[in-house]
Each structure stands twice: as structure tokens, then as C-alpha cells.
Image (cartoon, coloured by chain):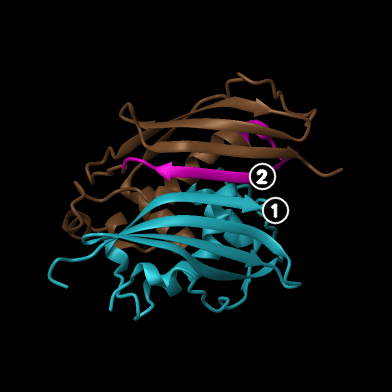
Amino acid sequence: MSSLPAEVGTVLPPLTFRVTRETLVRYAGASGDFNPIHYSDHAATALGLPGVIAHGMLTMGLAARAVTDWAGPGARLVSYGVRFTRPVPVPDDGVGAELDVAGTVTAADAETVTVTLDVTCAGEKVLGAARVVLAGSPA
Amino acid sequence: MPITPDHAGKAYAPTREYEVTRGKLAEFAAALGEPLVEGAGPVVAPPTFGAVVTGPAWDVLFTDPELELQLSRVVHADQQFRYHRPLEPGDVVTATLTIAKVRVRGATEIITTSVEVRDAVEQTVLVADATFVHSREASA
């Protein structure tokens, strides 16, 4: 782990992502997740949602970029878990939604580093218990 | 009979073999806004690429006629990936889903699943645990 600045309390460079319907279409195609609540307002409102929402896995994937961008290719992913605590509505208004991703090293030992992510949309937390555990690359 | 708590423990057959390719990794990374380097994709899968290889196993769950689930009435409640090793181009993997737990609260069904992704020599590459919330249609 010597390659990572791994002290507890280290703050990762924050990232901001703009998520539009185009982002959702692209993610649906790349991931194979074609749940219509991610492209059809009709399906989303039938489920009681305000409208189309982002794939939770898209939010989770974008949030991980804060960690992979920071850690670089030398780090190996051990685990990554989140709870999807609040949906991210993505209106078809040419603006979409903005996700802010912040990360802090919350644990570090000889083998692993734990980053806790704070992911918000319009100031509201959308992921809970979002933690990434990394290990150094095998020699 | 729709899904019930008694479905806990139900295990499905492994999905068809899936080959991880550099092109797919590049497409997936681009969908997460990563700049594409011409002629080269990532050499290691992004952290949530596990969902691509797990997805076919989730599809089997959502289309199991015995459970009477509708994908359009499913939201994802939590997700955990535990990687035993990185997924890399050239890996040929299968995904095997087990229903871990089912809770029913009125028309809401909370389904906890575990998917084990194994490589061509049957070694575990990753385990993906997920909880899905299915809201059954009142008229269904």
C-alpha cells in the first residue's frame, strides 16, 4: 500500500457528474440493465417515482471513479458496497441531475485502505454505507 | 403463487459462459464518463463491472415464472461486490444466483440475492450480493 497516501482522514479529490437521459441510455446499453424505470416516465410513475430515475448501479459506478482516479492502477479492489437510500430523478429537461462525490479514508492497515464515499444529489445523500476497500497490487 | 419467504435457498443453474473483452470494458468505462483511449480499453474491469457479468443471473431471477416478478416494478436497495481477484479481458465466467432471503410486507417483496461469479477453472472471481424491492401491482 506504500503507493497510496493512506492515512485515515485523507480527503480524495471530489468529483461532480452531470447525469442526463443520454447518460442513462448509454449506461443501459453498456450494462444490459433495461429496467424501463430508467428510460420511461410512464413506467417510473407507475411505480410511484417522480419520473425516470438513474440506475443505482450507475450512481455506484460513477461514485467509484473518485476512488479509482485517486488510487491509480496499482490498487486492487477488495470490496465495494452501498445502499441506495434515495432515488436520483433525471428529468428530460436538458439539464438532468448533478451528482457530487466526496471520499475520505476512514480506515487503513498494513494490507487495506477503506474509503467512505459521500454521494449527494441536490444536497441530499443518495448512497448510504458506501465503502470501498482497496489493497495494494500483488508484487 | 408469487414469491414467498420459502423461496430462500432457491439456487439457479449457472448462466451461459460470458467472455470479458477489452471492447466491452471500454464501452462500460465510457458509460461512466471515462475518457476513451483510442485502441485501448481498461486492462482491469471498473469496480461495478461485476454488474455486467451478474446481470444475466438477475435476469433469470426476474423472469422466473414461479416468482411472478416484473422487472419494471423492481428497484435496487443495496449492492455489495467482494472481489477475489480482478476481472480482466479474456476471463470466461459464469454467474450462479441463490435467493438468500425473502421478506414480504403487504404488496412489497424484499429479495436478497447472492451471485457467485466463477472463472473457467471454477475459481471464484467475485461475489455480488444485492437486495431488490419488488412492488407487486395491486390488481395483479
Residue A15 seen in render:
yes
Tag shown at residue A77 = 2
**Residue lying furthest left:** B139
- What is the span of residues highlighted in magenta in the rendered image? A69-86
Is A77 above or below relative to B129? Answer: above
**Residue lying furthest right:** A139
Q: How many marks?
A: 2
Q: Which of the chains bears the disc numbered 2?
A: A
Q: Which chain is brown?
A: A
What residue is pinned by disc 1?
B86
**Closer to the camera, A138 or B9?**
B9
Q: Residue at x 40, y 48 (%)?
A: A56
Q: Residues within 10 Å of mark 2 (few under 14, many from 20)?
A: many
Q: Secondary structure at mark 1?
A: loop
Q: Secondary structure at mark 2?
A: strand
Q: Are marks 2 and 1 on the same chain?
A: no
**Closer to the camera, B22 or B46?**
B46
Give percent across and percent down for residue B60: 44, 74
Residue A77 part of the magenta-drawn span? yes
Give percent across and percent down for residue B66: 35, 80
Q: Which of the chains bears the disc numbered 1?
A: B
**Are circles 2 and 1 on residues that touch, CB within 8 Å?**
yes
Residue B79 part of the magenta-drawn span? no
